[in-house]
Image (cartoon, rainbow, N blue to C red):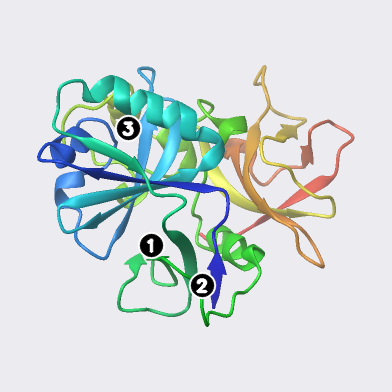
Amino acid sequence: MITQLNNRTLLNLSGSDAQSFLQGQFSNDIDALDQGVLQLNAYCQHQGKIIALLWVMKQNENFYLSFPSDLAGIVIQRLNMFKMMSDVIITDMSSELIQLGVIDEQPDNAFNLNEQQSIVLIESLDNIELANESEWEMACINNNVPEVVLATSEKFVPQLLNLDVDELGVNFTKGCYPGQEVVARLHYLGKSKRRMRQFQADAEFRVGDELIVSGSKSAKASGIVVRQVKLADKPMCLATVEVAYEDDEIRLNSADGAQLTRIEND
């Protein structure tokens, strides 16, 4: 199954310093990135909050970065600010290459995200039959693949999105990057009090919606919707939630909001 991934910016980074530059900016180990693999990377500010969650792909000596287009201005400005005198060329390829999400297939030219999903970059859609993009969102939710958009930028540290689990999106031995000290401190101090989980409800979700738990002692919302998909029966989402209350009664946006049901798959 193939879907076109709309509203995503695609940058190409080239130059002799591209790899070392990205290694010092992102949370994962760019030096260990192989060809044909899609690597999740958090681009954090100094307090460890995620500005953008990027898909990083390596092709020969060049790197592709894919992320939601509503964060393009912020990400590009930040990359340009930090590259300074480095030999790094940043080129926006969004209008040159089409990003396809592939489910349950393994094309030769794909960048693999997980066992079920991969990304292909092509120049033309000729002779390609496309499925609805909701199929990709459904696969992302089933595989616990988080997303950060403008509405949720700087609302999560990597642990809240489970990026530390099996070092999916954070490498704790790679060295420094913006926010690294905070992220590492949270990791070595113990378990995160909030984690990302799958939920369903009778009402539609919006990214950035809040989860309310009546028994929580927290002064703020118990969680935030990370990504969502509309289904014919019950809409589904990924959302952060206080682990201590993840199986309690959870409502959407208010104490009178729609009730959420956690989908247990872990």
Q: Amino acid at mark 3?
A: His
Please state, as top left, top right, bottom left or bottom right, where the N terminus lies in the image.
Answer: bottom right
SS state under label 3? helix
If you read the primary sequence from the N terminus, does the residue marked by circle 3 or circle 2 appear first? 2
Mark 3 touches mark 2? (CB < 8 Å): no
Q: Is residue 108 above or below residue 19?
A: below
The residue lying at 52 percent from left, 45 percent from top is 147
Q: Which residue is mark 3?
A: 187
- Which residue corresponds to mark 1? 113
Tell which circle, 3 or 1, labels the residue nearer the N-terminal end: 1
- Local secondary structure at mark 2: loop
Please say if 201 is above or below 103: above
- The residue under label 2 is 125
Amino acid beneath label 1:
Leu
Q: CA distance from mark 2 to mark 1?
A: 21 Å
Spatial separation of the CA atoms under disc 3 and disc 1: 24 Å
Please state which of residues 232 and 85 is positioned toward the viewer in this rendering. Answer: 85
- Residue 167: give x, y in percent of width and height: 30, 47
- Identify residue type, mark 2: Leu
Quadrant in the picture for residue 255: top right
Residue drawn at x 79%, y 39% is 251
Q: Is residue 219 visible?
A: yes
On the picture, is 63 further left or further right than 31?
Answer: right
